[in-house]
Amino acid sequence: MSTPNEHDDFESYKGDIEDVERRVAGEFDAGIRALVVAVLVFIVLLSFLLPHTGGARGFDVLAFTEAADREGVALPSRVFAVLAIVFSVGFSILALLTRRWAVAWVALAGSAVACVIGMLAVWSRQTAAEPYPGPGIGLVIGWLAVILLTFHWARVVWTRTALQMAAEEERRQRARENQGKGLLDLGKDDRPEDPDRPAG
């Protein structure tokens, strides 16, 4: 039989337990997929060292250098470079380091937009006027890596561990039980029975 002191000790730790549950629910566990994401981030970063079109490398496109102007780099290529470096590289690294669901969602959303803009970038280079070159190996590799990265981030953010699901369900159940209780009923069941108190 538990004494009131033991009950008070448990109540003092209850807030800490709930904080830990909330923190766990806000994190993801990528497992082996984290290694795949890290490799894809490295490939996207490496693609900026390769030519995106003609003699213009990815970093030239990103920095709007004279080499990019000389090759007639269009707006889709510039936007793709910015999205890829910010979301597919920056937010992906941040998500892997912090393991926060919200950051992973941002990395997924930005990378998904970068997939579409990357397709437009490749298409704009293929349909460029005669003096200008077509898409370079860096642009194609970077675009394919962003597509794969988007796929893996989608799998990570939609996969929840059994522990997270159970913790969330238990919290919802407790909230439903407490919602049905009135203000005077809260804590009523927790008080020990007084043996000297008359019945009725």
Image: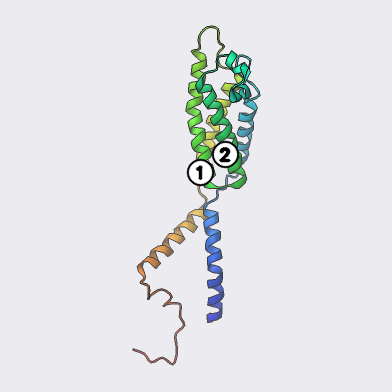
On the rendered structure, is 71 left or right of 123? right
Q: Nearer the viewer, mark 1 or mark 2?
A: 2
Residue 188 higher or lower than 146, as above or below: below
Please name the colour scheme applied to the rendered image: rainbow
The residue lying furthest to the left in this view is 200
Residue 49 higher or lower than 102, as above or below: above
Residue 16 or residue 166, whichever sits in front: 16
Q: Amino acid at mark 1?
A: Val
Residue 96 higher or lower than 121, as above or below: below
Mark 2 secondary-structure assignment? helix
Mark 1 or mark 2: whose residue is earlier in sequence: 2
Q: Quadrant of residue 42?
A: top right
The image shows residue 89 at horizontal and vertical percentages of 59, 34
Residue in the image at 37% along x and 73% along y: 183
On the rendered structure, is 36 left or right of 174? right
Residue where numbered disc 1 is placed:
157
The residue lying furthest to the top in this view is 130
Residue where numbered disc 2 is placed:
91
